[in-house]
Image: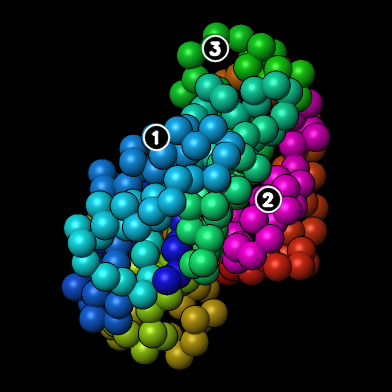
Amino acid sequence: MQIVFHIGANATDGERLIKSLLKNVDTFADQGIRVPGPGKYRKLIRETIMAMGGELPAPGTRETLLRSILDGGEADRLVMSHSIFLAVPNQIFDGGVFYGNAEMKVSSLAALFPEDQLEFHIGLRNPATFIPAVFEQAVIPDIGRYLAGVDPLEVRWSELLVRIRSAAPRARLTVWCNEDTPLIWAQLIRELSGVDPLTRITGGFDLLAAIMSEDGMRRFLAYLKSHPPQTESQKRRVIAAFLDKYALTEEVEEELDLEGWTLDLVQELTRRYEADVGRIASLPGVTFVAP
């Protein structure tokens, strides 16, 4: 079986993505793809991994999990999503390491499904916006204490991905930038589901509908109907053009009101993030989804 786990650096987009996937459950089921609701597996998998304590699972654990998640049914591909699987916001920098528990979480999940094809689909995010966002969700009041000695300028998603690859070398990694999601939303649905390329899907514009004005969305859909794009790249250029004109400011712009978060720091974090993304795109064993 193919076991797919989505991990996103933007919890809001992660929830939207699973909702878009759930709109296609009947279509996916016809191809042996199951997308259960998050309540079926998030707590169950978390508690199972905690009980393992870094050790191998008891015999029969995989079968018990799948029986519960799939309600006794069968699947060729099981798709799950959990934005905070690697760590809750409070613990992202525990011990002075960026996602220090990632190896344990990933290797434990691989141990639960040893004979299955495991896939991790990971959305990345510019540390300039990621760190303020997760700090706001944490209950630690001081940013210095929260970072536990980690220099924001040294946060590298590429290093985390290398650690994940080392902890689960048989797993496949598919990654993308959160900043690109409006342009690649439909492709992400297809990447996660593994659906046949010719299959029509629902929800490909869900994110656009959330970040674009109603008038802009109507005009966008009308334009697509009267000027059907011939290629995916053409469609993405149209999306970019309409977002440029009709995006809701409060949905696409973030206020970075964090002590010490100067414009110079934000620009340097962004520059390093873009360089890091360039490295990620060439990492062996990693599929990078670009717009």
Can residue 259 be seen at all in this image of the molecule? no
| Residue that appears at 42% across and 75% down | 194
Amino acid type shown at disc 1: Glu
The residue range painted magenta reads: 151-177
- Total numbered labels placed on residues in the image: 3
> Furthest-front residue in view?
59
Q: Secondary structure at mark 1?
A: helix
**Foreground tag (3 vs 2):** 2
Nearest to the observer: residue 275 or residue 7: 7
Residue 134 image position (x, y, % from top left)? 53, 29
Q: What separation in Å lies between label 1 and label 3 (alpha carbons)? A: 24 Å
Badge 3: few (under 14), some or many (20 or more) residues near its Cα, within 10 Å?
A: some
Q: Which residue is mark 3?
A: 140
Residues tagged 1 and 3 counted as in contact (Cβ below 8 A): no
**Image: 289 above or below 161:** below
Q: Upstream in the sequence, badge 2 or badge 1? A: 1
Task: Return the residue at label 1.
Answer: 47
Amino acid at the residue labelled 3: Ile
Toward the top, the furthest residue is 141
Q: Residue at x 38, y 71 (%)?
A: 77
Disc 1: CA contacts within 10 A as few (<14), some (14-19) or many (>=20):
few
Give the mark nearer the N terminus: 1 vs 3: 1
Number of residues whose C-alpha sits closer than 10 Å to that of mark 2, classed few (under 14), some (14–19) or many (20 or more): some
Three-letter residue code for mark 2: Ala
Q: Quadrant of residue 92?
A: top right
Mark closer to the observer (1, 3): 1
Question: Nearest the camera: 281 or 261?
Answer: 281
| Disc with the residue nearer the chain's start (3 vs 2) | 3
Q: Position of residue 80 (x, y in %)?
A: 38, 55
Q: Which residue is at 53% across, 60% downward?
A: 114
Residue designated by label 2? 167
